[in-house]
Amino acid sequence: MCLPYVEGMPDNTVPRDELRATLDARRELGEDYEPALVESFLDRLEAGIAARVKAEVDARASDPSPKDKQDVDPSIPIALGSLGIGIPLTAIAAGNAGFSGLLLAWGGIVAINVAYALSRGRRRGRGY
């Protein structure tokens, strides 16, 4: 019986060598010790399998999934938020200050979006 190789684990021929050693011990000690030898071998085999499974799980857990690597783009929520804020601001500004209030409200929204876009470009190294 030979387990598959897992990176970082000992050579995969160990269970085969342990089985041979167990069979040799059984020949030397006799049939009376067979149950104890088999149990001992199975315990070592289970420990080896558990170590290999743990190593594989740890190796896969350390690799980030493609979802973790994706850069979440907050541009759409910011654009929708700007529109959501813009609707009531348009009504308030136009009702209270007329066309100049409307220009001031939307000028502020545009300025915030432009400032965000410029800061985002600098963070990504684009420099614009």
Image (cartoon, helix red, strand yellow):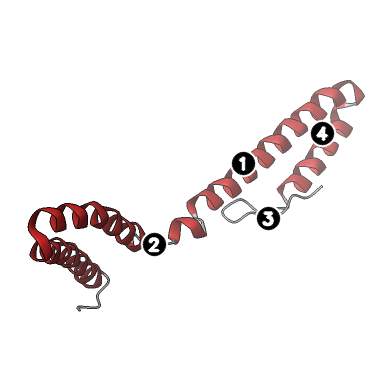
Query: Label 4 amino acid?
Result: Ala
x 24%, y 72%: residue: 121
In the rendered image, which quarter is residue 38 located in? top right
Image coordinates of residue 77 in percent, x first then y, are 34, 57
Q: Residue at x 31, y 62 (%)?
A: 79
Residue appearing at x 64%, y 45% in the figure: 52
For label 4, the crowd category at 10 Å Cα-Cα, with few meaning under 14, some 14 to 19 and many 20 or more, is some
Measured Cα–Cα span from mark 1 to mark 4 = 25 Å
Mark sitting on residue 25: 4
Q: Position of residue 61 (x, y in %)?
A: 52, 49
Mark 2 or 4: in front is 2
User: Badge 1 is on which residue?
Assistant: 51
Q: Which mark is residue 5?
A: 3
Tell me the number on the disc at residue 121: none
| Mark 2 → mark 4, Cα distance in angstroms | 59 Å
Q: Which residue is mark 2?
A: 71
> Tag 3: Cα neighbours inside 10 Å, few (<14), some, or many (≥20)?
few
Q: Secondary structure at mark 2?
A: loop
Q: Nearer the viewer, residue 100 or 59?
A: 100
